[in-house]
Image (cartoon, rainbow, N blue to C red):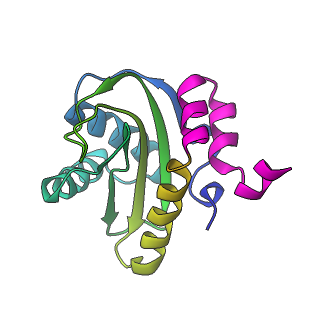
Amino acid sequence: MDLSDLLGPEDILPSMKTSSKRQLLQDLAEKAELKTGMPARQIFDTLLQRERLGSTGVGNGIAIPHGKLPGLKHITGLFARLDKPIDFEALDDQPVDLVFLLLAPEGAGADHLKALARIARVMREPEKVKKLRETSNANAIYSLLTESPASNAA
């Protein structure tokens, strides 16, 4: 599964302004509503419910909020680069500035896990993460997220 299967260039939020984790999740839910047609309130409630189980702040300034929604047709995502890092109650207590939202249909068991694993692999590449933090150009961010690892070895 490639990240280009989950998001398009229009799904990159290159300099999002937010002041808190709750506000970020609300803003992402509103953006996701435009993309999916699902109610923002339902998306927000699903994300909040997931966060109550444990923070999706995975460390190194990265968060991968995610959830499953009944009625959603396809696994989909949004990527946000925050103007200023925020407290996300991350595993390493570091503030978060790179956020990959992942939404999946309720019955998308293995595919949901594959998508999460793919996002985690991409976001573990130190050079890529550094470049994501250095650019506020949506197309450049999209290219960084969707390039295959083999293209770095050219």
**On the image, which quarter does residue 94 sit in?**
top left
Residue drawn 56% across the image and 57% down it: 6
* Quadrant of res 112: bottom left
Q: Quadrant of residue 10?
A: top right
Q: Is residue 87 left or right of residue 72?
A: left
Q: What residue lies at 47% left-to-right and 65% top-to-bottom?
A: 117
Instruction: Judge left or right: residue 137 versus residue 151.
Output: left
Q: Position of residue 28 (x, y in %)?
A: 36, 39
Magenta segment main secondary structure? helix
Residue 152 in the magenta stretch? The answer is: yes
Along the viewing direction, whichever of 30 and 101 lies nearer the viewer: 101
Name the residue at the right extreme: 154
The residue that appears at 66% across and 41% down in the rendered structure is: 144
Which x, y percent locates residue 4? 65, 55
Q: Residue furthest left?
A: 52
Query: Residue 30: x, y in percent?
Result: 36, 39
Question: Can the viewer see residue 2 in this picture?
Answer: yes
Q: Nearer the viewer, residue 93 or 49?
A: 93
Up the image or down, 31 lies above or below 43; here it is above
The magenta stretch is: 126-154
Direction from residue 132 to residue 32 in the image, left or right = left
* Number of dots carrying numbers: 0
Taking the spot 44% from the left edge, 63% from the top edge, the residue there is 116
Q: Is residue 74 in view?
A: no
Q: Height in image: 127 above or below 154?
A: above
Q: Observer-nearest residue: 94 or 140?
A: 94
Residue 134: horizontal and vertical position, in percent? 58, 23
In the picture shown, does residue 84 fall above or below 22? above
Q: Based on the picture, tell me whether residue 36 belongs to the magenta stretch.
A: no
